Image (cartoon, rainbow, N blue to C red):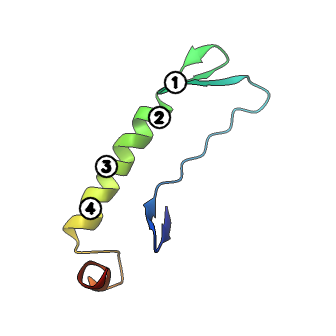
Amino acid sequence: MLIQPGGVFPVNTKNHSAQPVRVAGRTLMVAGRKTRHLSKAAREEARASKLLTAGGGLPGDGGWRRRHC
């Protein structure tokens, strides 16, 4: 996760060395096969957002960001 004043952004990496990668809309293909990388990343982002919101802000900030931003 990248946490900065502009927001919280999920970072997800995969290693597909020497394989052709194609992106079309919301589909990511590796070596000619559809992957579930984008849908899984979206679910992870939604879960992280829900957990951070339920916790009252970013971990360790005591809810300061929620009260002052």
Labels 2 and 1 touching (C-beta < 8 A):
yes
Q: Are marks 2 and 4 in contact (CB under 8 Å)?
A: no
The amino acid pointed to by label 4 is: Leu
**Mark 4 sits on what residue?**
51
**Image: 62 above or below 7:** below
Secondary structure type for disc 3:
helix
Query: Residue 38, which numbered label?
Result: 2
Which residue position holds label 3?
Answer: 46
x and y, in percent, of residue 45 in the image: 38, 50
Residue drawn at point x = 46 percent, y = 74 percent: 5
In percent of the image, x 39 and y 41: which residue is there? 42
**Badge 3 local density, few (<14 within 10 Å), some, or many (20+)?**
few
Q: Is residue 39 above or below residue 30?
A: below
User: What's the residue type where badge 2 is placed?
Assistant: Leu
Q: Nearer the viewer, mark 3 or mark 1?
A: 3
Mark 1 residue element? loop
Q: Do labels 3 and 1 touch, CB within 8 Å?
A: no
Foreground of the two, 39 or 25: 25
Give whichever of 25, 35 is nearer the camera: 25
Real-space Cα separation, disc 2 to disc 3, in angstroms? 12 Å
**Circle 1 is placed at which residue position?**
35
Assign a secondary structure to mark 2: helix
Q: Is residue 12 left or right of residue 19?
A: left
